[in-house]
Each structure stands twice: as structure tokens, then as C-alpha cells.
Image (tube, grey):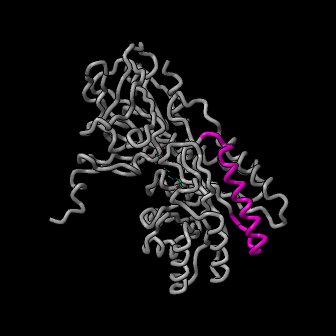
Amino acid sequence: MYRDRLSLFPGTVALTPDKRGTPALHVGGRDLNELAAEFGTPLYIYDEETIDNAVHAYQDALNRHYPGPTGITYAGKASLNLAMAHLMAAHGLLLDCTGIGEMHIARTAGVPRAQLLMHGVNKSRADLQAGLAQAGTLVVDNLPELEGIAQLVHDRGPAPALWLRIRPGYAVDTHQFRQTGQRDSKFGMDAGECVDAVAFCQRNELPVTGLHFHQGSHFHAAEEVLPALDVVCELIGRLHQELNWWPQALSPGGGWGIAYHEADLPHQSIEAYVATVAAALAENLSSYSPPLPRLQVEPGRSLVARAGVAIYRVGTVKQAGSRRWLLLDGGMADNIRPALYQARYSALPVTDPLNRPPISENAWLAGPYCESGDLLIEDLPLPEIKPGELLAVPVSGAYQLMMASNYNGALRPAVVMLRDGAAQLAQRRETVDDLLLRDIA
Ligand code: LLP
């Protein structure tokens, strides 16, 4: 009954007998029990092969379905550290950094300027200065920002390529906290403002070369992009006619969703999503004479989420009223998503995950933090689980550690990258001394 859950795990997942002959979960050629023993828990592991395969799925689909040039930007906000920046840069992807902080990580990883793109809805002066000095592409959110850029460029020299972020007026169907494309969203400019922005760039000799939109994150029907694409293509027609301007690049943002739970399966493929966007864009612009703009997709979650697994150790097992509680050594401090978006996850025990007899009472998985909202998974069918056992939560690679906190003095977990049976520590676990690093005695 738990077998479907296996397909939520990274592509390299396997069940391999341990020393006593009991099957245990393996990922990237490594036994999760051994990884937990070596690196401690909670532990976040990433299977690099699963990331490679997601990148290739985007690349193959773009090559197959778009008649013009294409590219991929990785939205670093989903998961960023030096190892991840290296991996994405090695794949030739652009790296989207929100502001000076993520830019610093990417630069420290040695990502070349041409591969750095900066986003941000309310960029500070420091963000803008970093973007202008270090990024190959800067996505402009609004007109005052553009005026600030013109001033800084005037003072300091050449600008990176500028793309304008249009607010298309259509969001995708997702949690409201993740919607960005709607008419009253805080992100981007409406079509009229984009026309003004291009005219401003022309007057001020700023290198405006692209358009960008992003309707929201974690949607599941590719067709949801089409109304926004229509708006953007209409704008392109207008810019062509009124200002004789044509984009070299067009980014439909990211947002393609994934399956987190067995109830989300099957999920439409990356190829289906890309095919829909590519065909609509090519068709929409087919009557114009300039060459098709580069189609630059910008996924985060769909590249990294499934590659990640969070491993927790069960401490107390408690019956309270009708609930069977499994209390874990991590929860809302490393994964705020259930509390913030009612995100629904699944889990398997690391040892003998599939063959234990089911029991009638579902499990409630919670962390050690002082909030009843610290609830990782509600009402999940699981066999009997004993204190001290390890549980693996799949699809943990996106927006978990990036939104992690030190709430209740929690120490952020270690991150380990796996490839071909080798485990590389990418980020060490925090120590109690890290909690004092910013304090002034
Ligand atoms: N491009 C822009 C401009 C974005 O704002 C985002 C995500 C992406 C691309 C990538 O979207 P993705 O492909 O990862 O869906 N914390 C939320 C997700 C917030 C997404 C923010 N922007 C969550 O945990 O679900």
C-alpha cells in the first residue's frame, strides 16, 4: 500500500538489504541509515542525478518544441548553496539571484557574470549596485527602479542586459501566497508601464533586451500560462509597432508544479508544460518578421524538489486522544511549508519501508517546536513506528531549507550531495555557537 510513495523519491531510489537482510531505502547509491549515522539528523540529502535528469527534461523539451533559441534559468530561491550553484552553472544554466545575498553566494561559487541574473521586487540600492556590477541580466520590476538604474549607470558605466517584468493580469491556480501575475499583485509592471519603460530605455540608451513574466509558483496545468502569454505577445506587437522594439529574450518565469504526495500522482510532465508554452509563443509571434526571441524558462522547484529527501529521527511516540503522534527531531524550523501553505507531504520509514503490516490508525508527524502549528504531516497511513526509527520525507529539495529558521534555537540541518555512491557534505549542521554569531557581547 505504500509502494506509490517510492516514486516520489529521487530517481535513484532503491531498496537494498541491510546487514540483517532487511530492506532499507537507498538514494544515490547510499543507505539512508548510514548517511544518518554519519551526518546526524535531521539531514537533507540531494541526489544530483535526479537534478541532472530534470535539467535534461527541460533542455530536450525546449529543443524539441521551440523553433527558436532557448535557455534555462535556475531560480536559486528554491535551493541555493555553493554546491548547488556549481552544479547549475556546470549545466550551463543561468542562475536567478534575488538581491545581493543570493548574488554573493553565486559569485563565491564562481558563476560567471554572463550566467548571473538578478530579480527582486523592491531592490535596495545595494542590490542594484551589485546587479549592475555583477549580473549579466537584470530584471527590472518597476519604473522608479529603472530611473534609479539609469542614474547608477550614468555614474558608473555599462549596464547588464535589462529585461522588463510585465504583470500580465493572470495568476496561476495555486496557494494565494504564491500567486504573482494577477492585476493587483505587487510584482512587475502593466503593459502600459512596459511601453513607457522601453521608451525610457531608448531615450537613455539603456540596453533593454527582454521581457519577463511569472504568474505564480506550483501550478499543474500548462494551459494556465496561455492567457498571460497572449497579453505578453500583444504587448510585443505594440512595442514593435510603436517603438520599433523587439525582444531578444522572453521568459515565462517558472512555477511548474510537482507531486509531493501519492495523491498528486500522476503529474503532467515537464515536456507537456514546455511544449504548451513553446507552441503558443511560436504561433503567437509567427506573423512578425523579426526572429523569435530566445525562450528562457525559469524553473526552481521542478528542477530540485524531487532530488531532495529530509531524514528525521522519531523521538517520542505518543497517543493523545484519537491521534497517534510521531514526534520528530525536525519540523517547522526546517520546513515551514505545511504551516504556511498547508503543503501536504508523505513519508516512509527508512528500514523495511514497504512490507510492514498497515495499522488502522494514521500517524500525525510533528516536530519538537513549541507550536501546535509545527505539524509536518497530518493523518498519514504508516505502519507501527518505534521511537528511534528514521523516517524519510521525499520531495524536500525546494523552499524548505531556504525558508528555515532558528526558531526555538533550532540548528539548521546539514546538507549532503549524493552522486554515484559518493556523499559530499555541502553544508554542515549549525552548532549552538552559530546562534550567537551576530550577537554583540
Ligand atoms: N521566477 C520568479 C520570478 C519567481 O518568483 C519564482 C518563484 C520562480 C521563478 C521559480 O518558481 P518555481 O519554478 O520554483 O515554482 N515558497 C513557496 C514558493 C515561492 C516561489 C517564489 N518565486 C513554496 O514553498 O511553495
Q: Does the magenta stretch include residue 230?
A: yes
Rendered image quadrant of residue 206: bottom right
Q: Left of 125 or right of it: where is 195?
A: right
Of 217 and 309, which appears nearest the observer? 217
Q: Which image quadrant: the C terminus?
A: bottom left
- Residue 92 visible in rendering: no
The relative height of residue 353 versus residue 63 in the rendered view (above or below) is above
Q: Does the segment drawn in magenta span residue 149?
A: no
Residue farthest to the left?
A: 441
Q: Which of 58 and 206 is in front in this view?
A: 206
Residues rendered magenta in the picture:
220-249
> Picture quarter containing residue 108?
bottom left
**In the image, residue 63 lies at what x, y percent?**
74, 51
Residue 125 picture location, percent across and down: 44, 75
- Magenta residues: mostly which secondary structure? helix
Q: 45 and 18: which one is in front? A: 45
Can residue 159 be seen in this snapshot? yes
Write the residue at 42% across / 64% down: 101
Question: Residue at 45% across / 33% down in the picture?
Answer: 345
**Residue found 63% across the figure and 78% down from its top:** 200
